[in-house]
Image (cartoon, rainbow, N blue to C red):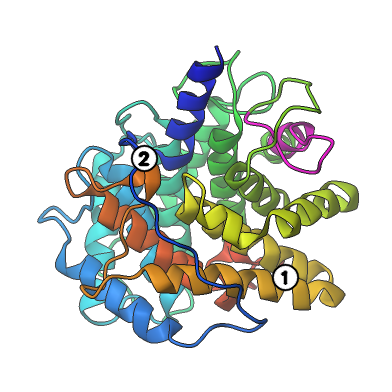
Amino acid sequence: MRSTRIVSIALCLCLLVGASPGKSLKPAAPAPAGPPKGIPAARDKGLAWLTKNQGANGSWGKTYTVAVTSFACLGYLAACDEPFKGDNGKALTAGLKYLMGVQKNGQFPAQGHSWIHGQGFATLALSEAAGRSLFCKTKPDIDLAKMRSVVSAAVKVIADNQSTSGGWWYKPGAKARHEGSTTVCAVQAMVSAANYGIEIDESVLGKGFKYLKKCQNADGGFDYQLDNSPNTKSMKEGTAGDVATLGLMRKFDFAVMMNGYKFLLKITPGAISKERFPYYGHFYGCMGMRLLGQEFKSFRDKTGGYIAAAQTDVLSWQEKSGQWPAMSYMKTSGGEGGAYATSFAAMILGADEGRLSIFNRTPPKLPG
């Protein structure tokens, strides 16, 4: 039973089929508060690698093209104020068109073991792209009204597949099953849609937040799934995901967030760098710390230091080609790992710049 659960955790966090653990990269030393030097150049080089290695149909990845393409699109959106300009903008637009082309009535196809991860991240990518286009001088060559309608349909599909517990499961229709990373994906997609004026079911969102809060353990970390066992060993990367998602609650839950914050500070970004899913953990860890710093200004030295330490580690891993390597369970397999890792690295390096709406406690003020 224990071994089955470990495999499930591995699958849910990385979204892809994990290879056997190999040689891990040594994390860099903790960084001081403030963004480390070299972020713009490293990120630009990484995005150039993604643009050069995009598939002819606009996708990235091999088996999990919906999820990996969504990560890449979010990486471009997190990187600059005018994401639809130039060659990178063309690649982003092609990726968005691919996502719109594979969905049907707002539902994205299941790939591999998990449907909801692709559904959630694709909805998030399209929502963020449609929303950002409202503020950009350069517009994407895409039907933006149709994109918004796809997001609207997609969040309804997500809502329809919420379990009776308030969480979500890997596959559609599993009303009795649930776990944390699936719930994180679903909730963040719904928050993004609402941020850009797309109607969502607020009761579904509330139940999702409630589910995640109930997964918190006595040590401040979070469990893989709701099981009413507060003394089990907490996940590291999974805790980062839960803290980041609960940071988007309209009404901040002080006790839950403080305990999660203390847990992440205690384990440090360096510990996450050594774990099985460092990119996943750092993406959500940086996001959660940014949201905490926005809510409590007095915390910004520690939250800023946490973000800088995570970014310093990520910067140290970039290869000469511009790509970031897959690590631990995410070793490159069929070309999927490099796109996955490079996309997440771009998002991590853009966390404290706040261009994705989910990096901010306050939704953007929409034009008009």
Residue drawn at x 45%, y 68% is 314
| Magenta stretch contains residue 66 | no
Q: Where is residue 121? Give x, y as percent.
A: 44, 47
Which sits in the foreground, 105 or 342?
Answer: 342
The residue identified by callout 1 is: 303
Binning the other alpha carbons within 10 Å of mark 2 as few (below 14), some (14 to 19) or many (20 upward) gives few
Q: Quadrant of the C terminus?
A: bottom right
Residue drawn at x 36%, y 26% is 113
Residue drawn at x 27%, y 67% is 323
Q: Does 164 sit left or right of 58 as displayed? A: right
Residue drawn at x 84%, y 54% is 258
Q: Identify residue type, mark 1.
A: Thr
The residue identified by callout 2 is: 21
State how far apart marks 2 and 1 are (Cα): 30 Å
- Up-down: is 237 above or below 144? above
| Magenta stretch contains residue 219 | yes
Image: magenta residue range: 208-224
Dot 1 lies on which element? helix
Q: Where is residue 211? Give x, y as percent.
A: 72, 31
Which sits in the foreground, 95 or 195?
Answer: 95
